[in-house]
Structure formats: structure tokens, C-alpha cells
Image: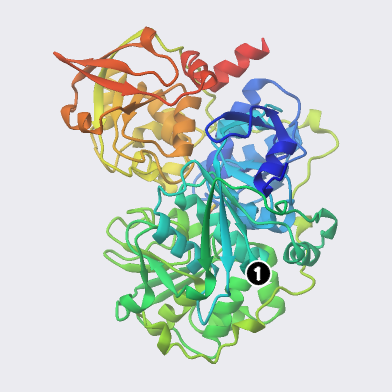
């Protein structure tokens, strides 16, 4: 039987199920990663399972989101993460070492391995040929406990690349091109597997930019084969031993196919406020730019920043534009230093930020009011930058560097062709930063976990009753993101290990009375539109509503990771059979649900006053049982009893 690359990896890790799209499968997970904003909760959950150490081949706890240490909260969390890692056998990456995905790609990701991470951009490691998926923190906790990871078998799409990028187009423009073509919903239930002669011209960091932002397409993940370019990257990272050649069988079958001619792609930008609202840069020419931010897990590699340094060399940025640069890791920073590439950026007027997520998560570097910020990041949702009325454009580092120089978007035809980007390639050897990670000590059993006041143990949730009378706590529109449900920003994310405190911010920027209403009714239902819960994997956007008494979300459709998070915390995701019924429901109406009728994929009626609407679900048997038992933690604990 001829297999594509994705199926080969899944087959090798399959615990149960069949490789048929739509079927539920369980796979063994080799590696896990967490970042601090989701990690504290994942480790509280792991602890509640009661094991002595993690069961994976490798698990890494990164601190890259809330690195600013003002007040006790973030430092308390960092201390908890540091001691929990030592106690349970994880590698700890201290704040300032770098961004989780960049660091994982450089140091730990392996071709052919399975990886889940409590961050939606975990698919970045697909650039090296790993099957890497974003998951809720709870799924990561369970993978660390040796439980298989459950997914619905996605459709595998062959993305056949031909040609070669031309002029100033770069890897970021490839993924922006795909976002324009397929939209933020176009990848739901699918994996993009890249093949074709166009692969040859793409290095691992460029591939990782594409797989990183595949998350914005709604994909389960994206993957590139492990080939000579992969070997070259691993060799440069000092870990050629991790290389294996891996690709699809000749004539492998795919569920769908698409062909992209790389030479047809031009410099692009995602315009406010969605990553798929993509326009050519030439159409934006003349638009004034107040701020440029270069970095994030999408575009903070050595190759990205070297191209910026070459553009800025011996020049000055526009006096009315701010330029922020955050290298993705200390390795990238060291390489820039060693090759004298940092000074050209600083000398042009750029500001150097810590090797961390920083402005991407609104952690400093917010644009001015009504400002236009050009960012090399992956998301431009309203308010995510920390400035509610700012307008964010997502571009490549090359486009961003030209915008910083000119203080406005300019037509790429006017960019001087004298910069020879062909010169930019990864050095044959890079400096190792392995010594900066903290590896678990020998005396793990003696390590004392340190818990500051911000670490609040989890409350356990009750099973699903057979009848529910639920008031509508909020009714929202299409494409509600997890940022809408629970905004980011230092004040809020600092409370991620304190559920009672963080729940006060649920829907705080959409409806200021939501929390009060939920507390008054003690339980309720949320009504959503299409693609409910898209965006970051933030499981607190499900956990905190559950804490406030949300038992059901009824929507037109759900984003994959948020849907999984809802189920994990015992919230029932129901779908309108007729989307027009959405219009019939009003705030604070009482919806009566007879859950004895609830079964997988079956329609049921919800009574509202004197009429009834028909809803359905796409739950598997296991998911339904998880919800009935009050969430995944209850389910696993009951199973292990
Ligand atoms: Fe960090 Fe932004 Fe990526 S928050 S992990 S740089 S999407």
C-alpha cells in the first residue's frame, strides 16, 4: 500500500482507529511542549493525575509569553514551572531563552516524530517533518501521562509546489497567498502535506514559517518531508543524528490536491483584522505606517533577521516610525552578534526586544491609538496588540523592513534590487545554546514544588445532568476568537493559574455584563455564529466559562481546538441544524434541554418558550462520555480507578 508522509507517521504511532477521514483515531505522542500562559494549568492538571514523572520521550516547558516580571504573579508562575519541570522530568526553558516554536525547531523537533503542544502554532515543527499539532493544555497533560492523543482523522491535502519564489517574495508570502485562496476556515479538518519540485528552494526555517501559519487556515497541521534541506538544517544545529529521510511513497494517494506555482507569488499583506484579508503590497502603497514589529514564532529566524539587517544596513528608518525587533531565540541573537548583523538594525533606529513573544501577545510594544502597525506575526485580530483601535498588517520581514525605512507601504517595484537575498543561507554550523536549558536533576523525588499565591488548585466539575434549564448568557456573531472570549494582555494572562480571578475577564471586551449575568444565573448557554472559538489555543477560554457555569455552547460551527477544549472541560458543543434558527434566540431566554435524548450525531430539540429548534452534534462516543462525566480529567481519573 502506498502511503503519503502524514499517514506513514500516523500509522507508526497509531493506538486505535482507522486512517479514514472523519474516523476517530488515537495516536502515541513522542514529545510535548508547553508555553507558560497555558503551561501552568497543564501542569496543575498533570499533577492531579498523580504520576511521578512524565511518560513521553521528551517534554519541554518554555517560558516565552509572560516574561515581564512586574509584581509577583509572573515570577511565581515561572518558579512553579521551573520546579514542576525538575520534579517530573521535563526540560525547562527559562524566560528570555526564546520563543517555544523557534527553540523547539532548533533544538528538539525530530522528523517522523509526533508532537503536541499547548499552543496553536505547534505545527511550526512540521517544517522539519514532525507531525506537530496544537492542543489544549489538558490534552498535553494527558499525553505527558502516557495517554494517547485523540483526533478525528483529517483529510490529507497534497500541496504540490512548483517554480521558485521571485524578487522580494518570501515564505511568508506563500502562506499569505494560501490564506487568501482558502480563508481562515479553508483548512478545517485537513492536513496540508507539501510536495513537489518547489520544495528544493525552501529551507527548514522558511518551511516552518509556512507550517506555523497553517494554523491560521484552521488546519490540523502542515508537514514538509525530511530531505537534504532538513539534513542541512539539523547538521547546522549540531544534531545530524536526528535526521532521517522521510517522504511520501511514490504515487501516494491524497484526499485532495492543489498546485501552487511559487513564481506567481508577489509580496502580500494580511489587512485588519483577519489573517485571510490578504492584499498585494502594491495596492497598499502610500499607507502611512506608525510601527513595525519584526519577530514572533512565524518570522524570527536567523534568515528572517539577516534579510532585515541587509535592508537596513547603512540606512535610517523613517523618523515617524518605530521599529521593534525580537529575535526568536538566543541562538538567533548570538548569530546576529557574531556576524555583525545586529548593529545595522540598531544603528538604523531599531529597538531590540527580549527573545520572547512580546508584542505578538500584547506584552509590550503596543502601537499608538489608531496606529498602523506592520508586523511579521501570524495574527492581526482586533485588540490583540494591546491597542484596541490599532490596525495590524501582517507581512514578511522584507516588506516590514521596507515599511520601516519609508514610514509607509511602498510598491515592491520601487524596492532597490541591489540586495542579493540569494546570499542568505543558513551557516554550516550554528552556536549551540543547549546549556541554557535546565535539564531535570538526578534527585527528582526530592524536588519541592514552589507554589506562590497565584497558583490556585483546580476545582473539580460536576457531571452533565439529564435536564438543563439554561439562560442565554451571551449571543455573539461569526468568527468569534478566543481573544474575544478571553482577551490577552499582561494583566489578564498573569492570572492563568488562578481560574476564579481570570474568569472575571470572560467576554469583558464584548459584553461588560457577561460575568455578572453568569454569576447571577449560576449556569447558562452561549449562542455563537460560524467558526466559534477560532484563534489561539487558549484553553482558559473554555475552562473559565465552565467555572462560571456555562454548560452548553450552541453555534453554527466551531473552530477545532476550541471545540476540543470545550469538550475537555465538560461543555457541550451543539450545532444549529438550520443556521437561520440562530436569529430566533434572544439574550436571557431560557432554553430547556432534555439530555436523555443526547446521542452521537443525532438531532435533538431544544425548547424555547412555545417553540422548538433542532440542533445536532458531531461528537464521538468518547467525547460524549467525557462531557457526560463532567470533562476529560474526570473521565481519565474514573478510567484509572
Ligand atoms: Fe508567541 Fe505569538 Fe507565537 S504569542 S508562540 S509569538 S503566536
Viewer can see residue 382: yes
Residue 364 vs residue 277: left or right?
right
Residue 122 vs residue 87: left or right?
left
Residue 481 vs residue 323: left or right?
left
Residue drawn 49% across and 89% down? Answer: 315
Position of residue 450 relative to residue 34, above or below, is above
Which image quadrant: the N terminus?
A: top right
Q: Position of residue 598 (x, y in %)?
A: 39, 13
Position of residue 114 relative to residue 370, above or below, is above
In depth, the one of 78 and 263 nearer the eye is 263
Q: Position of residue 340 (x, y in %)?
A: 67, 82
In depth, the one of 503 and 428 nearer the eye is 428
**Res 241 quadrant in image:** bottom right
**How many other residues sit within 10 Å of disc 1, few (<14), some (14-19) or many (≥20)?**
many
Position of residue 371 relative to residue 217, above or below, is below
In depth, the one of 490 and 88 nearer the eye is 88
Query: How many marks are shown on the rendered structure?
Result: 1
Q: Position of residue 54 (x, y in %)?
A: 73, 32
In depth, the one of 133 and 460 nearer the eye is 133
Disc 1: residue Cβ within 8 A of ligand 1's nearest atom: no
**Res 226 quadrant in image:** bottom right
Q: Considering the numbered disc 1 on the image, is that residue within a helix, a strand or a loop?
A: helix
Q: Which colour style is shown? A: rainbow
Q: Which residue is mark 1?
A: 333
Which image quadrant: the C terminus?
A: top right
Q: Position of residue 174 (x, y in %)?
A: 50, 66
Viewer can see residue 68: no
Position of residue 307 relative to residue 72, above or below, is below
Amino acid at each position: 500500500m502506498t502511503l503519503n508522509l502524514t499517514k506513514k507517521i500516523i500509522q507508526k504511532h497509531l493506538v486505535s482507529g482507522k486512517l479514514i477521514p472523519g474516523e476517530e483515531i488515537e495516536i502515541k505522542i513522542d514529545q510535548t511542549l508547553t508555553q507558560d500562559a497555558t503551561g501552568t494549568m497543564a501542569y496543575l492538571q498533570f499533577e492531579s493525575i498523580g504520576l511521578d514523572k512524565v511518560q513521553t520521550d521528551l517534554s519541554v516547558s518554555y517560558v516565552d509569553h509572560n516574561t515581564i516580571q512586574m509584581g509577583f504573579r509572573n515570577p511565581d508562575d515561572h518558579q512553579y514551572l521551573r520546579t514542576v519541570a525538575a520534579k517530573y522530568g521535563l526540560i525547562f526553558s527559562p524566560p528570555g531563552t526564546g520563543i517555544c516554536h523557534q527553540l523547539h525547531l532548533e533544538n528538539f523537533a525530530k522528523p517522523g516524530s509526533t508532537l503536541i503542544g499547548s499552543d496553536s502554532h505547534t505545527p511550526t515543527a512540521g517544517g522539519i517533518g514532525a507531525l506537530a499539532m496544537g492542543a489544549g493544555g489538558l490534552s498535553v497533560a494527558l499525553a505527558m501521562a502516557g495517554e494517547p492523543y485523540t483526533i478525528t482523522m483529517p483529510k490529507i491535502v497534497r500541496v504540490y509546489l512548483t517554480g521558485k519564489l521571485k524578487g522580494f517574495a518570501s515564505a511568508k508570502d506563500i502562506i499569505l497567498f494560501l490564506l487568501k485562496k482558502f480563508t481562515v476556515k479553508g483548512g478545517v479538518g485537513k492536513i496540508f502535506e507539501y510536495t513537489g519540485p518547489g520544495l528544493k528552494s525552501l529551507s527548514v526555517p522558511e518551511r516552518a514559517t509556512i507550517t506555523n501559519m497553517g494554523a491560521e487556515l484552521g488546519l490540523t497541521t502542515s508537514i514538509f518531508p525530511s530531505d537534504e534541506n532538513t539534513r542541512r538544517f539539523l547538521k547546522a544545529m549540531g544534531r545530524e543524528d536526528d535526521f532521517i529521510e522521510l517522504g511520501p511513497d511514490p504515487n501516494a494517494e491524497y484526499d485532495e490536491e492543489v498546485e501552487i506555482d511559487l513564481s506567481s507569488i508577489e509580496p502580500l499583506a494580511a489587512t485588519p483584522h483577519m489573517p485571510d484579508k490578504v492584499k498585494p503590497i502594491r495596492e497598499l502603497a502610500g499607507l502611512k505606517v506608525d510601527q513595525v514589529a519584526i519577530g514572533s514564532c512565524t518570522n524570527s529566524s536567523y534568515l528572517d533577521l539577516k534579510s532585515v539587517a541587509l535592508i537596513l544596513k547603512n540606512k535610517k528608518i523613517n523618523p515617524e516610525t518605530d521599529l521593534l525587533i525580537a529575535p526568536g531565540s538566543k541562538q538567533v541573537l548570538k548569530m546576529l552578534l557574531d556576524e555583525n548583523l545586529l548593529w545595522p538594525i540598531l544603528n538604523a533606529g531599531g529597538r531590540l526586544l527580549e527573545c520572547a513573544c512580546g508584542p505578538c501577545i500584547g506584552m509590550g510594544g503596543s502601537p499608538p491609538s489608531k496606529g498602523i502597525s506592520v508586523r511579521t506575526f501570524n495574527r492581526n485580530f482586533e485588540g490583540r496588540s494591546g491597542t484596541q483601535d490599532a490596525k495590524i498588517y501582517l507581512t514578511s520581514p522584507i516588506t516590514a523592513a521596507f515599511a520601516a525605512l519609508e514610514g509607509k507601504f511602498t510598491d515592491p517595484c520601487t524596492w532597490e534590487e541591489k540586495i542579493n537575498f540569494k546570499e542568505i543561507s543558513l551557516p554550516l554550523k550554528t552556536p549551540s545554546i543547549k546549556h541554557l536549558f535546565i535539564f531535570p536533576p538526578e534527585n527528582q523525588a526530592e524536588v519541592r514544588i514552589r507554589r506562590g499565591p497565584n497558583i490556585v488548585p483546580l476545582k473539580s466539575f460536576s457531571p452533565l445532568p439529564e435536564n438543563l434549564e439554561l439562560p442565554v448568557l451571551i449571543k455573539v456573531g461569526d468568527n468569534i476568537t478566543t481573544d474575544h472570549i478571553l482577551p490577552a494582555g499582561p494583566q489578564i494572562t498573569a492570572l492563568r493559574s488562578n481560574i476564579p480571578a481570570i474568569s472575571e475577564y470572560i467576554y469583558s471586551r464584548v459584553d461588560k455584563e457577561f460575568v455578572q449575568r453568569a454569576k447571577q444565573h449560576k449556569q447558562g448557554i452561549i449562542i455563537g455564529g460560524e467558526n466559534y472559538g477560532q484563534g489561539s489555543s487558549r484553553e482558559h477560554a473554555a475552562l473559565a466559562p465552565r467555572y462560571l457555569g456555562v454548560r452548553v455552547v450552541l453555534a453554527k460551527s466551531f473552530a477545532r481546538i476550541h471545540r476540543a477544549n470545550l469538550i475537555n472541560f465538560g461543555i457541550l458543543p451543539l450545532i444549529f441544524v438550520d443556521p437561520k434558527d440562530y436569529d430566533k434566540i434572544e439574550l436571557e431566554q431560557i432554553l430547556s434541554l432534555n439530555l436523555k435524548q443526547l446521542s452521537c450525531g443525532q438531532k435533538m430539540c431544544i425548547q424555547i418558550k412555545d417553540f422548538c429548534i433542532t440542533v445536532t452534534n458531531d461528537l464521538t462516543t468518547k467525547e460524549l462520555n467525557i462531557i457526560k462525566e463532567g470533562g476529560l480529567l474526570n473521565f481519565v481519573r474514573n478510567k484509572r480507578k
